[in-house]
Image (cartoon, rainbow, N blue to C red):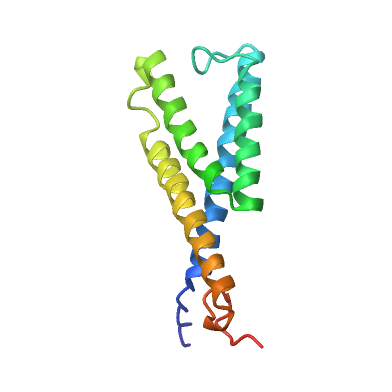
Amino acid sequence: MKKKEKVPLTPMQKAVSQIRTAGIMAFVSAAITLFITIAAMGGAQLIDGVNILMLFDVALVVALGLLILLLKSRIAAIFMFCYYLFSQISMRIENPDMLTSGIFLLVIFIIAYFSGIIGTFSYHKLKKAEKENPDANIGNQNNEPTS
């Protein structure tokens, strides 16, 4: 049985993959926050300082995820990265016992969001190059000649 050869991704496919990952991670982050908020409203005290206002956080993160996924927004990707960093730093300052907990997830989210920034900038750069020179085949995801 032959192994399938891995076909390298085109620059456009890589950019779209990075954008997709960042958008999905935003939804995962929103889901985790929603779960913690609902649990706190039900009486569980998972993290200090959680209240009903965290639903605004959920809505903001979902909106940013949609902007990243649907519009490939560079501003939304940057804002999501900065917002996540700020919220994690402030949460860990408020809860010193959480300083080292969840570091693995923290790193995964930071990498995903930073990758989303890179992906959105690459995507728009490739689209611009494709517009300026349609025959160059830059943004063609299938690497096939355009007719």
Furthest-left residue in this view: 100
Furthest-front residue in this view: 132
Residue 144 is drawn in which quadrant? bottom right
Height in image: 32 above or below 138?
above
Residue depicted at x 37% and y 28% = 101
In the picture provided, is 52 more to the left or to the right than 125?
A: right
In the picture provided, is 13 more to the left or to the right than 37?
A: left
Measured as percent of width and height from the top left, residue 145 is found at 59, 87
Measured as percent of width and height from the top left, residue 85 is found at 42, 32
Measured as percent of width and height from the top left, residue 67 is found at 63, 45
Count of numbered badges drawn on the protein: 0
Residue depicted at x 49% and y 73% = 10
Residue depicted at x 38% and y 41% = 107
Front residue of this view, candidates 74 and 96: 74
Front residue of this view, candidates 116 and 146: 146
Height in image: 14 above or below 48?
below
Front residue of this view, candidates 146 and 38: 146
Measured as percent of width and height from the top left, residue 21 is found at 53, 52
Height in image: 26 above or below 128?
above
Height in image: 106 above or below 42?
below
Q: Classify the position of the C terminus by image quarter.
A: bottom right
Residue depicted at x 53% and y 61% = 123
In the picture provided, is 81 more to the left or to the right than 141?
A: left
